[in-house]
Image (cartoon, grey):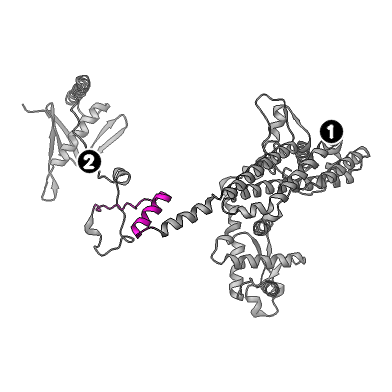
Amino acid sequence: MTEPGGDGEGRRDSLDLDALAVSDRFRLFNFTRRDDHVAYLWVLRALDRLRSVHQIQAHTEDVAKALEELADAYDEVPPIEDGKLRERLDALAEDQMLHRLEDASRAGSLARYRNRQSVYQFSELGYRAFTAVEDVLSARIRDANLSRLVFSDILDDLRALRAATAADDRDQVYRRLSRLDTVLDDMSRRAAQFHLTLGEIVRSTDTSPATFLKYKNALLAHMTDFMAELDRYLPRLAAAVADIDEARMLELVAEADDRPFLSAADVRDDWRRRWGALRAWFAESHGAGAAAGHADNSNNVDNSNNRVAEEPGSATTESRAEGLRTATRAAVSGVIALLRQVTEAQRGGVNRSSQLRHLAQWVCDTPDERAAHALMSAAFNLRSARHLGGVHDDAEQISSRATWQDAPGVDISVTLFRRGKAPTPGVPQPARSNPAIKAELRRRQAEERAAERAAAHALLGSGAHGRVLDDNEVKVLLRLLTLATEARTVVAGRVKAATGGNDVLTMRLVPSDRGSQVRTRNGTLHLPGFELDLTPARR
């Protein structure tokens, strides 16, 4: 079934969380990555024990007492000191697993009042994270099964739902639809878990064929009975779903739903999504849009290798129950084929274990250790390790007594790493002559020089002050200014005149108390303490 609050296609709400929200949710599982994660787990179990007796808020003493009760029943409970217990509770509160509240009423004296009297309780997301971890720890392969007896209960609930809808009994409609929602969610989870477990059994038959042969008869009988029950009830379930007045039923269940934190529109959308997922289980979807609307169900049995039989352009999509039947039939065929392989391997006496035993016998019969290493290398395709080394760019900075673990790494060429050969510069490449490119470069260089000469003549004729210089004139001026500042000298603590020039003009920096300014297109260049004197270059 779709989760409440999802979108119209039954997609999980977790897909809509941004990276910051996902990182914040992952903090809830920080206790599983700590060094003493087992102690944190038992602390949470103690809080859950108090929660089960309706003690929502617990002090450190209450948690310690609950841990003592758990230690009496289980030997795996680690001893936790009172100071360590408070630290662990505070760490869980920082990870948002718990809420930490101050309870001054517990202080019986002034000294206790001065000390922090904190009580702890599960946060909503923290309790979900704890139950998720507990579900993973309590999962057992033997619990996987296909619930074949549930189809009769689903049929009875659908018929009762139709009768309650016809009688406008909204409370009964709410009860029956909620029960169907829970039952189908459980059936989806069981189907996914069963097919995943079956895949693990099939993959592990190479190492444990005895386990597979032990349970093969019960496994085949279980899947055969499930398919027979599904074939018997599926037509009647589809007919029962079609007989229900969907619009009236959704109106009644929305009126009976009393969740205070959802608006009326949200409640109607939630039950519409739930009913759409329930209907997709037993009734075929017509049209490409309907098929796409149910393809992303959060608890779909697609996790168990079930795929919706939808082809481009098809008008009808098979129900999920039919898809589950197809996947179960394929699983039966796979189990039978695997049974044939295991039986033939045992009959012929050649399997992986027998091959390894023969190989071990050959290794023991080899004349010397070198032959044994050669045989094992050939059997398992092992090669000798290639050790690479190099010299650091600055070898004097590295002590000769430093170990290879402490010394910094060096760059190794790809040729040396892959082929074991040091890189070479290779044969000299022939010199290539491209006259077209050279001619183009000469032309551009001549244009640049002509532009610079024209700018120099403009500077010499119009001067550098009292007007706005263009880009070429600024380039010439800055170049001459650089030459002049590099050639200046300091005599008796004062800068004398400096000179810089080219083949067109000569620029002198003359000391001045007023200074000077040069205006350009990009701003004003200030020359404090100097004036520019431009004269023709001497031939």
- Residue 3 coordinates in the image, percent (x, y): 72, 45
Q: Label 1 is placed on what type of residue?
A: Ala
**Is disc 1 placed on a helix, strand or loop?**
helix
- Please give the name of the residue rendered at 65% of the width and 59% of the height, measured from the top-left corner: 137
Sequence order check: which comes first, mark 1 or mark 2?
Answer: 1
- Please give the name of the residue rendered at 24% of the width and 59% of the height, measured from the top-left corner: 397
Q: Quadrant of residue 9?
A: top right
Location of the C terminus by quadrant is: top left
Q: Is residue 380 magenta?
A: yes
Does any portion of residue 203 appear in the rendered image?
no
Q: Would residue 129 be found to the left or right of residue 455 on screen?
A: right
- Please give the name of the residue rendered at 52% of the width and 53% of the height, measured from the top-left corner: 354
Q: Quadrant of residue 139?
A: bottom right
Q: Would residue 241 be found to the left or right of residue 505 on screen?
A: right
Q: Label 2 is placed on what type of residue?
A: Thr
Does any portion of residue 311 appear in the rendered image?
yes
- The disc at residue 242 is 1
- The disc at residue 424 is 2
Q: Is residue 308 magenta?
A: no
How far separated are the C-alphas under marks 1 and 2? 78 Å
Location of the N terminus by quadrant is: top right
Q: Quadrant of residue 174?
A: top right
Q: Which residues are magenta?
A: 366-393
